[in-house]
Amino acid sequence: MWKPPERIRHTASPGIWPTAEEAARSRLFSPLDLGSRRLAQRSWIPAMVPWRATEEGEVTDDVVEWYARFAQGRPGAIVIEATGIRDVPSGPLLRIGHDRFVPGLRRVVDAVREASGGETLLLIQLIDFLRIRRRPERHVFFTRHLRIDDALRERLGGTREDEAVLRERLETMSDAELADVLPARELESLRMGQRERVGDMEHPHIRELPAVLPGLFAAAAARAREAGFDGVELHYAHAYTMASFLSRLNDRDDGYGGSQEARVRLPLEVYDAVRAAVGTDTLVGCRFLAEECIDGGSTVPDAAFYGRAFAKAGMDFISLSRGGKFEDAAQPKPGWAAYPYTGRSGYECMPQYLSDAGGPFLRNVEPTTAIRAAIRADGLRTPVVVCGGIHNFQQAESLLQEDKADVIGLARQALADPDWFRKLRSGHGEDIRLCRYSNYCEGLDQKHKQVTCELWDREGLEEPGVARSHDGRRRLVAPGWEPTNG
């Protein structure tokens, strides 16, 4: 993963923990109307992929226990991991592209309701992604994947030699020589693995995305409603299909790329289809990027434009992230796929404790504040969720008091301590496990291993009934907590 050259060590600060009385008076623990629902408190656990589904995208006992454990902390809302809207193989990621997934997802809903005493709202994040292939071995690329056509032959001086001989010759070329003769996309496929883009208009299935995606998202949202979720979060962030439509790099020439108005067109059409499918009694919002953090990518003014458009369209909430793109990802090893959190944009999404002067805390606050202000300037009151390195009460409360956000999102801190919310509200802040921001969890995610936290995954392994990782070395959910002094 990319790291800033400064390598300044930052330490999470507990600040001053509130008493139970102070917490009760805080804005953080005050309710907030969210569309047709009400948040009991202004806290939010964003979507995190824990790699606990089956290879067929089905819910497992481990999935149920994962979300039930977060619910025991009684946050205002939990967003279930990015869940695929297509019924296609995608490894151990949850899917919702067919009715057969509904019963399993209903198990998660029921478990969260029970564990939170009905206090926590539950949403599911809906995602579409384009195809990305693993980086091929060099020999495999030149013998199987490289397309030999007249244009490539012309680049090689008009050679008419036999294709098999030509492939062998190319395989022996140096990287510098290949950079002069291979088309940019072929060179990328060799170095990174083949990746589809929304601008690949020569492919019918890419050209037809605007006609296909609204229906897919709407059908998935209807299944989420049937499963009992309070709402859906449309995944318009990071390296995936909808974020790519919003990106400044989207150069489609069919009215869905180029200008801001054209880039936001499909995301709005998806929202309209979803809203029509689920009505007004199901929450519908989205998560998108405050900044792409890549060369030529979308910036805060772009995001402010999108945020205003989403709010005007009637979204119930807006959640903001940053970075996490394929464009600057590190080169994967042969046999591995590119991971969109290994470049500078990935660092901006999940900065760690060894950082630049800005540090890993509150890095997305200033952009979020600007986007929220643009929405408010239009007279719109759409709640805005801020995320990124928030871990103590003072940080959360001041962001709310200063009207920089309406809801506080905690991902890594909630993973470190799912009871952060209960402990704060009951006056037991001193019992909180503070995230170290070492990105231990991110390292597991990158390897598609079951995600856990180093602060608790070796604790009490011998206790009866503790579910363990596939290798048996780590527990899969945090130990329980109950106050010891009332």
Image: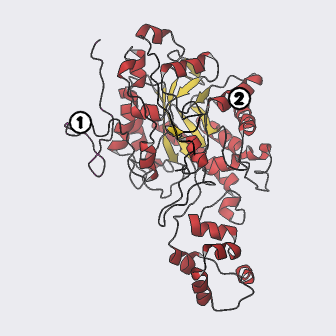
Q: Quadrant of residue 267?
A: top right
- Give the magenta range: 459-486
Label annotation for residue 58: none
For numbered disc 1, what is the local secondary structure? loop
The spot of residue 361 in percent (x, y) is 54, 31
Q: CA distance from mark 2 to mark 1?
A: 45 Å
Q: Is residue 111 at least partly visible in the picture?
A: no
**Residue that mark 2 sits on:** 370
- Nearer-N-terminus badge (2/1): 2
Q: Is residue 465 magenta?
A: yes
Q: Residue at x 66, y 39 (%)?
A: 271
Residue at image coords 42%, 52% = 448
Q: Quarter holding the C terminus?
A: top left
Residue 58: x and y in percent read: 40, 49
Residue 478: which quarter of the image? top left
Percent coordinates x, y for residue 66 in the rendering? 37, 38
